[in-house]
Structure formats: structure tokens, C-alpha cells
Image: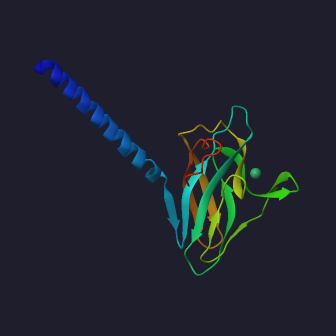
Amino acid sequence: MPCLRRAAFEAHLLHFVAAGCFVLLAISLPALATDYPLEHLLIEHPYARPTPPGARTGGAYFIIRNDGRQADRLLRVSSSAAKSAEIHSMTMDGNVMRMRSVPSLDIPAGAKVTLSPGGYHVMLVGVLHPLVAGQQVPLTLTFEKAGTIDVHADVEAAPPAGQPHAH
Ligand SMILES: [Cu+2]
């Protein structure tokens, strides 16, 4: 039954092609995260977490790498997606996690400063609409020496609990 065999072969081929596409997609996904160079700084992989409907605040995160010989400082963050954006630190006070607004964030020469859930972060205060996974949040970062840059934070769902974070 050559016809049947051929159909089976084509189905197999389709399956193979589909599998190949899936692998390609899986490999290319992390590469979509964008890094933004600014003078001697590199803003790596800006992202935000989705917010439930009605939430007033959201968090945005990125890594700042300073490959220069001069220290710099993150002075300000703003976003058209929220009424205001604040730089926050997160510290443990006994068993209680406390967020505090900090006036600026030092980026020493040669350092890599990570903003992440549970640490330093950008708090979007008064989000104008829920942050939805797959969308982007515009952020404007102003540094003391390197100047100002616009970046887009990808809204990414948190990895399931217990799984290592891939960033
Ligand atoms: Cu905060």
C-alpha cells in the first residue's frame, strides 16, 4: 500500500518539521531579551512581572553592568505605564521584608548591579493598566554620567516555584 505508506511518511515528516520548529523556537526565545548599551553601561534584559487586575503597583527589574572605569549612579526612573516609578531596596527586618525608596543607586566601576524580585527593584506606582505577560513596559532610566536611555521591559510571568530562574 504505497499510498498509505506515503501518507504515514508525510505525517512523520510533518511531525519532524514541527518538532524542529519547536526546538528552534525554544532555542531562540532567550535571545529575544534585549540588552541596551549606554556609554560604558549595559542594561541587560529589562523585565517586569504581570500584575493582577486592580493592582496599584508593579515591579520592574534589570541588570546594570558598568564596564567603565568611572562609577555611575542611577538617579531616576520613569514610565508612561505608571504615575511614577521609584527605586526601591528590599531588606529583611527580622522576619519581615521591608521595601524602602532610595534616592539613587550606585553603580561602581566594573560592577554588575542586579535589580530582581527580593532585592533592588523599580516600583511602578499607580500602574495605569494591568501589566500583561507578553507585552512591554517602557522605562526611561537616567544616570548621573551616562545620561538617559529608553528601554522596554518584557512582561514575563514568574517561573513556577521551586524552579531555578533562568536569567
Ligand atoms: Cu517596591
Q: Where is residue 76? Give x, y as percent.
A: 69, 61
Q: Of 8 and 28, which appears nearest the observer?
A: 8
x and y, in percent, of residue 95 in the image? 86, 52
Quadrant location, the N terminus: top left
Query: Image quadrant of residue 93?
Result: bottom right
Report the residue at 44% width, 47% height from top. 29
Q: How many marks?
A: 0
Which of 124 and 113 lies nearest the eye of the viewer? 113
Horizontally, is 93 left or right of 5 in the view? right
Residue placed farthest to the front in the image? Answer: 1
Q: Residue at x 88, y 56 (%)?
A: 94
Quarter of the C terminus within the rendering: bottom right
User: On screen, 148 above or below 132?
Assistant: below
**Above or below for 62 versus 125:** below
In the rendered view, tell whether residue 63 sits above or below residue 79: below
Which of the 4 image quarters holds residue 58?
Answer: top right
Taking the view exactly as shown, the residue that stands out farthest to the right is: 94
Q: Quadrant of residue 55?
A: top right
x then y, percent, for residue 96: 86, 51
Asked if 14 appears above or below 22 in the picture, the reply is above
Indicate left or right for 47 with 123 as reference. left
Q: In the rendered view, how is the structure colored?
A: rainbow
- Residue at the far bottom in the pictured view: 69
Image point 21% across, 24% down: which residue?
8
The residue located at (70%, 55%) in the rendering is: 121
In percent of width and height, residue 114 lies at 64, 62
